[in-house]
Image (tube, rainbow, N blue to C red):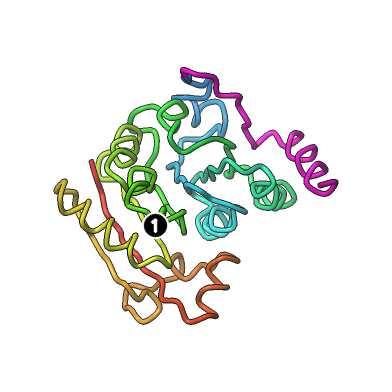
């Protein structure tokens, strides 16, 4: 508990981490529509990682693509600490983090303000009664459509084949465009440098022999 409190205190000092108190009903945040001008102070494309956990994917993508801006979003502050600390220590001014629920994404970004989205190993919510909580349910896809630029790519990486199949069915049902998909990424010709990034969570499951599924799609 002491270690967690220390991390919470440290993350409060990071200017690149936003931790708004979202009331109900939630309201638009001051940064909405102003990420380029006021936060990053450049006009580079913005890439989101949703449910970023420790922010490993966010940071590694940022290392590979310094010409883009990256924002990791997660509700767990103790998780965000790791990625935000790395970005701080390495002076990665093109990296930011938001501690909030994914469902409030429309209150942080204006229409077309986001260029690309990564969904990396989200909670699959395996019970059918929880289907609407899946980050690739149509209710969430509509939220992404409200902020992503036309033609912007969305990527899903998951070790859960049921979520992979659910996502494919949802995309087909609503006639969204699927650019690529595989239920075994590491045996697929789709594998490249950015898809080869492995978070701590992913390493655990690949070491146990789990296959990694991947979909690249667009919804606007």
Residue 117 can be seen in this image: yes
Res. 45 image quadrant: top left
Q: Judging from the image, what secondary structure is the residue with disc 1 in?
A: loop
Task: Examine the rendered structure and indicate whether residue 31 appears above or below residue 112.
Answer: above
Is 142 within the magenta?
A: no
Task: Examine the rendered structure and indicate whether residue 43 appears above or below residue 34.
Answer: below
Foreground residue among 42 and 216: 216
Foreground residue among 153 and 76: 76
Residue of label 1: 126
Residue 27 can be seen in this image: no
Q: Which residues are magenta?
A: 1-25
Q: Residue at x 35, y 76 (%)?
A: 184
Q: Residue 2's spot in the image, x, y percent? A: 85, 46
Q: Residue at x 83, y 43 (%)?
A: 6
In the displayed structure, does residue 103 sit left or right of residue 19? left
**Crowding near pointer 1: few (<14 within 10 Å), some, many (20+)?**
few
Q: Residue 180's spot in the image, x, y percent? A: 25, 64
Foreground residue among 64 and 15: 15
Which part of the image, by quadrant, shows the C terminus? top left
Task: Examine the rendered structure and indicate whether residue 116 appears above or below residue 146.
Answer: below
Q: Residue at x 50, y 30 (%)?
A: 35
Q: Residue 207's spot in the image, x, y percent? A: 55, 80
Is 20 within the magenta?
A: yes
């Amino acid at each position: 508990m002491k270690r967690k409190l220390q991390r919470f205190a440290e993350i409060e000092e990071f200017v690149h981490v936003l931790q708004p108190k979202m009331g109900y009903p939630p309201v638009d945040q001051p940064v909405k529509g102003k990420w380029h001008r006021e936060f990053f102070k450049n006009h580079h494309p913005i890439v989101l990682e949703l449910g970023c956990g420790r922010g490993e994917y966010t940071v590694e993508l940022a290392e590979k693509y310094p010409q883009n801006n990256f924002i990791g979003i997660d509700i767990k502050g103790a998780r965000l600490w790791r990625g935000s600390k790395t970005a701080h220590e390495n002076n990665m001014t093109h990296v930011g983090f938001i501690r909030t629920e994914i469902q409030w994404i429309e209150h942080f970004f204006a229409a077309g303000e986001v260029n690309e989205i990564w969904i990396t190993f989200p909670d699959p919510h395996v019970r059918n009664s929880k289907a609407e909580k899946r980050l690739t349910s149509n209710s969430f896809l509509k939220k992404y459509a409200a902020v992503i630029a036309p033609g912007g790519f969305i990527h899903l990486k998951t070790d859960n084949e049921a979520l992979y199949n659910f996502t494919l069915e949802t995309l087909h049902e609503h006639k969204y465009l699927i650019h690529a998909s595989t239920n075994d990424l590491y045996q697929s010709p789709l594998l490249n440098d950015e898809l080869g990034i492995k978070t701590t969570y992913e390493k655990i499951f690949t070491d146990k022999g789990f296959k990694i599924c991947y979909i690249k799609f667009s919804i606007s």
